[in-house]
Amino acid sequence: MAARDLDAVIVGAGFAGLYMLHRLRGMGFRARVLEAGSGVGGTWYWNRYPGARCDVESVQYSYQFDEVLQQEWQWTERYAAQPELLGYANHVADRFDLRRDIQFNTRVKRAAFDEAQGRWVLETADGARVAATHCIMATGCLSSPNLPQFEGLESFAGTRYHTGYWPKEGVDFTGKQVAIIGTGSSAVQSIPIIAAQAKHLTVFQRTPNYAVPAHNAPLDPEYVRTIKADYPALRARAKQTMTGIDFDYSDQAALETSPEARTREYERRWRHGGLWFLGAYKDLMVDQEANDTAAEFVRGKIRERVRDPEIAELLAPKNTIGCKRLCVDIGYYEAFNRLNVTLIDVSQSPVEAITPRGVKAKGREHEVDAIVFATGFDAMTGALLKIDIRGRGGLALGDKWREGPRAYLGVAMAGFPNLFTITGPGSPSVLTNMLPTIEQHVDWIAESIAHMRARKFGRIEPSLAAEDGWVAHVGEAAGRTLRYTCGSWYLGVNIPGKPRVFMPYIGGFPKYIQKCNEVAAAGYEGFVLS
Ligand code: N01
């Protein structure tokens, strides 16, 4: 298809880009996806580190837009592992014949709005150009790996890996001395597996993280049959919850419950496993005293799981549980009972340097063959700001977002006509189940483009006033929760120099859907269509 004929160019072929392409095609629009990788899958294409798996149950972490798809696809485990998730993305791409409109191995470097033509012109790393009326960024929230610039990083003579950029062929650590820096979700998942393989694993921990057990297991066919018998009901229930996950969230307050009953409830949720733990009480994320009761319960579990009391104490977080993303583990704490695992606490004195032979911390060099950087991502804004995005009058997105991201509904920005971000900053995104959140965004964007076509509008752009109002609302909502209180990637604190702004919308999925629907029903209130 000639590039000039495109209605939309979509950047990224993860779950967001795939569905966006399918949806637009289904409405008769001509769209093309540009994808940096050689295959589909986004997060699940890049994050191939050992143990990578989803922390939302697979029957819910899946598309719902096509009933036949959700009936035919068979998940094998409660929490799907990366190969299965990547298989699912590939299945969707094949089933809906999406590949013919996806251009792989194509990294977008620049995207500029041509005001005279009313089109976006995208430039790729090889210098090619693609133009389209609409530009839709499906670039992901956690897709720009963060590699801290440790002194001597380049001097390391062994092999370096980043969990978010793992070699396709996999890595065999058998017989190797390995270091891992970081103890977030990626490390929590990979440490037990690397520890079982490597000769020795040294873990450098700056901040301990709370993890609750996954209790992962093969899916019970009877359970799956029950869900598939009425999938739409489960999906509808999920849309009524803050996170877009069909959980039973308690409406009780921890502080109005007796300590004995509270412990029973935490124990029940601990035995069930997963993120559901934080649904135990409605005040856990808004009241520090309530939060402390859950945190202390988990600290107690860590002390039970880790044999050496000193190591248990180092692994036991002291901060607010759920402030940073809660981890879901499979044998994480038990890995520290192994004789071939050493924990180095770098909370008081940072990693000093990477040397040709290993990692230097606390005045000692730890010699290793490989270093795994499990150091996370420049979340939510990183992937967008890596592209030189220019709106009206050459306005650079980097300049617009100098004090932090600003967008209306997390989906569009003043000064950037016809540009949409799927699960962008200011939308619930990472605080929700990504699949339903992506579908909601994609549907809303597709319908807005259809609305424009039906009324012969060429441009859509939010007003500055609408954007300001939404940004203020996102900030107010964040300020009401304990999530605002720690140095998390939600706030951009993990990236030196990044403005400290709580990026996702914490008001909950139902409220957000309602707002988006109201905006559309009122003829795209807050947007200027011309
Ligand atoms: O990254 P992170 P991640 N020196 O930012 C440490 C999703 N996810 O890739 O906390 C020493 O959480 C840093 O320390 P600190 C999920 O949403 C989901 O693990 O900043 N250490 C931290 O320990 C998750 O939240 C799944 O003090 C340094 C670690 O590196 C998000 O992705 C699985 C350092 C980074 O942790 C990101 O998770 C995986 C330095 N200079 C990921 N710089 C599931 O679905 C950073 N660190 C289960």
Image (tube, grey):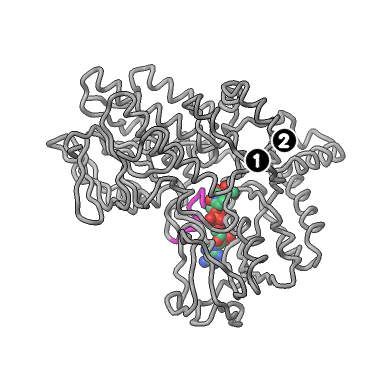
Residue 238 in view in this figure: yes
Does residue 265 appear left or right of residue 350 in this picture? right
| Vertical order, 160 against 50 (above or below) | below
**Quarter occupied by the N terminus:** top left
In the depicted structure, whether residue 511 falls above or below residue 10: above
Q: Secondary structure at mark 1?
A: loop
| Ligand 1 quarter of the rendering | bottom right
**Which residue in the structure is indicated by mark 2?**
281
Q: Residue furthest right?
A: 260
Q: Is residue 51 left or right of residue 340?
A: left
Give the main secondary structure of the magenta stretch: loop
Q: Residues in magenta? A: 489-496
Quadrant of the drawing holding the C terminus:
top left
Residue 311: quarter of image: bottom right
User: Measured from the top left, where is residue 121 in percent x and y?
Assistant: 20, 43
Name the residue rendered at 65%, 56% in the picture: 209
Q: Position of residue 248 (x, y in %)?
A: 69, 30
Q: Residue at x 50, y 40 (%)?
A: 88
Residue 245 at x, y percent in the picture: 60, 33
| 126 lies left or right of 38 | left
- Label 2 – label 1 distance at C-alpha: 24 Å
Which residue is identified by label 1? 78
Q: Position of residue 461 (x, y in %)?
A: 28, 31
| Kind of residue at disc 2 | Tyr
Q: Nearer the viewer, residue 138 or 503?
A: 138
Which sits in the foreground, 185 or 223? Answer: 223
The kind of residue tagged 1 is Arg
Picture residue at 40% right of the left edge, 31% below the top: 442
Whether residue 487 is visible, yes or no, is no
